[in-house]
Amino acid sequence: MRLDEKGYKALHQREGLKLKPYLDTKGVPTIAMGNTYYLNGQKVTMKDRPLTLAEAEQLGRVTADNFAKKVDGLVTAKVNQNQYNALVSIAYNIGINGFAGSTFLARVNRDPNDHNIASAIMMWVKDKELIGRRCSEVIQYFS
């Protein structure tokens, strides 16, 4: 599968878009849609120049597409587009290693319509600021 335009839009809204480098909640230099690296593999630093809107959107889209490919390789069950978009959003936020070892992925692969997936997704709320994001992803998943 591929992330569709609704998936990109939802991910963009969740991540936000910042043209100048900033420190994320863990103090890591970040830019664009939560990116800590550029397409060339270089780490973001606080001394980097601001990106243009086009550069930031391209960075976010390419990164999201890379996550989507990895998610596609880990999801073995047949999921619908909304489920897939939500799973890519979660993987983008928690990282592919966290995604690969998650309880919710195991549940998705057993039965993508299992309502216990919602509680497993909500286990990935490390900071209270993520509650809204996870709720949004659960709603997207089950819509």
Image (spheres, helix red, strand yellow):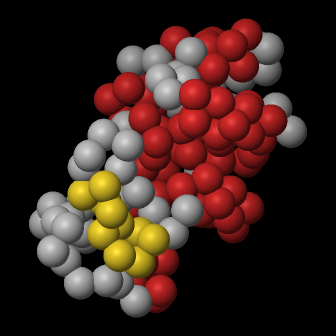
Q: Looking at the image, is 139 positioned above or below residue 5?
A: above
Q: Is residue 138 left or right of residue 84?
A: right
Image-quadrant location for residue 49? bottom left
Please provide percent x and percent y for residue 120.
Answer: 61, 14
Q: Is residue 132 left or right of residue 43?
A: right
Please provide percent x and percent y for residue 51.
Answer: 35, 84
Q: Looking at the image, is 25 positioned above or below residue 78?
A: below
In the image, 44 versus 83, the foreground residue is 44
Q: What residue do we see at 33% from left, 63% from top?
A: 22
Quarter of the figure that contains the C terminus: top right
Image-quadrant location for residue 86? top right
Q: What residue do we see at 65% from left, 30% from top?
A: 131
The answer to whether residue 55 is seen in the rendering is yes
Q: What residue do we see at 37% from left, 36% from top?
A: 96
In the image, 8 versus 129, the foreground residue is 129
Give the tally of numbered discs.
0
